[in-house]
Image: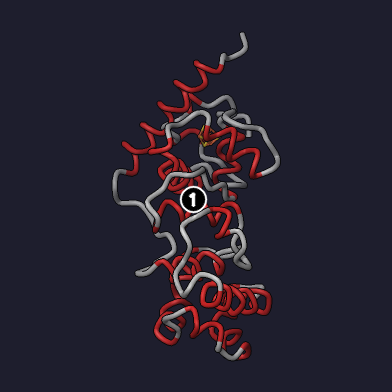
């Protein structure tokens, strides 16, 4: 029998509850940051790159560049040298510089707390905008869908949407806003540890009885 929306919502809640019990509060690593600007720049670098690698690179980057104007005035070659290990470094260096310019000139040097404004920054995607809103603005505006959230929500039968924005909106109907960041972080944890892209370890998975894809991958 097809699962009703209410049944799916209850299952979604149980999934998150189990993951919280499994991983507790000791979650991460995620992109390290001490200021809103550092989170913006770190998440730009995290495209197609692990958070560990981003954190290695930002040790030097964040020591040298502290304000939006610092990035605006930076030498592209120097930015490229520092961030090279994160991949796509030419494109990312231009994004850092241009985002620094926009924050400095348009937003008075402060990271804006609005999804629409964040989306005007170069290299800031729909996913990144919602992460920044949750982590530095304290507002739960949407669920950030990265590769792990995408894969797990499909395998778990929570959303089969291919477009990440559509998927984010579908997932958001299943959870209260206060859980949006938790969905992102706990799904990432489980995707890294158990529900891996190539070899999901269903036999060890705490979600197996809640997952329509258990043992079928
Ligand atoms: S049961 Fe298997 S496919 Fe389902 S969430 Fe767990 S590891 Fe992933």
Q: Residue 156: which quarter of the image?
A: top right
Residue 94 visible in the snapshot: yes
Secondary structure of the residue carrying tag 1 is helix
Horizontal and vertical percent position of residue 96: 57, 76
Q: Quadrant of the C terminus?
A: top right
69 vs 206: above or below:
below
Q: On screen, 192 above or below 54?
A: above
Q: Which residue is mark 1?
A: 192
> In the drawing, does residue 21 fall left or right of residue 45?
left
Query: Which quadrant, please, contains the N terminus?
Result: top right
How many marks overall?
1
Q: Vertically, is 200 above or below 109? A: above
63 vs 101, left or right, is left
Which residue of the protein is positioned furthest toward the top in this rendering? 1
Q: Is mark 1 within 8 Å of ligand 1?
A: no
Q: Quadrant of residue 154?
A: top right
Position of 140 relative to 137 (above/below): above
Neighbourhood count class around disc 1 (C-alpha, 10 Å): few under 14, some 14–19, many 20 upward: few
Front position in the image: 180 or 213? 180
- Tell me what residue is drawn at x 55 percent, y 41 percent: 200
According to the image, what is the colour scheme of the structure? Answer: secondary structure
Q: Is residue 117 left or right of residue 17?
A: right
Q: Residue at x 55, y 60 (%)?
A: 118
Q: Can you give x and y, in whole percent of width and height, for residue 111 in the image?
A: 46, 66
The image shows residue 69 at horizontal and vertical percentages of 50, 83
Residue drawn 38% across the image and 56% down it: 28
Q: Which residue is located at x 52 percent, y 42 percent?
A: 195
């Amino acid at each position: 029998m097809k699962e009703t929306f209410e049944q799916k919502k209850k299952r979604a809640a149980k999934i998150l509850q189990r993951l919280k019990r499994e991983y507790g509060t000791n979650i991460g690593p995620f992109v390290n940051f001490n200021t809103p600007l550092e989170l913006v720049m770190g998440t730009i670098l995290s495209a197609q790159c692990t958070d560990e690698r981003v954190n290695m690179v930002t040790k030097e980057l964040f020591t040298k560049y502290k304000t939006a104007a610092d990035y605006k005035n930076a030498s592209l070659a120097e930015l490229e040298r520092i961030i090279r290990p994160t991949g796509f470094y030419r494109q990312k260096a231009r994004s850092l510089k241009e985002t620094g310019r926009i924050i400095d000139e348009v937003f008075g040097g402060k990271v804006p707390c609005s999804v629409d404004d964040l989306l005007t920054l170069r290299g800031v995607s729909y996913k990144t905008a919602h992460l920044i809103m949750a982590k530095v603005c304290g507002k739960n505006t949407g669920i950030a869908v990265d590769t792990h959230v995408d894969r797990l929500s499909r395998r778990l039968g929570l959303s089969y949407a291919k477009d990440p924005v559509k998927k984010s909106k579908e997932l958001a109907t299943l959870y209260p806003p206060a859980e949006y960041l938790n969905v992102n972080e706990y799904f990432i944890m489980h995707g890294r540890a158990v529900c891996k892209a190539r070899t999901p370890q269903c036999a060890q998975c705490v979600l197996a009885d809640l997952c329509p894809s258990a043992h079928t991958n």
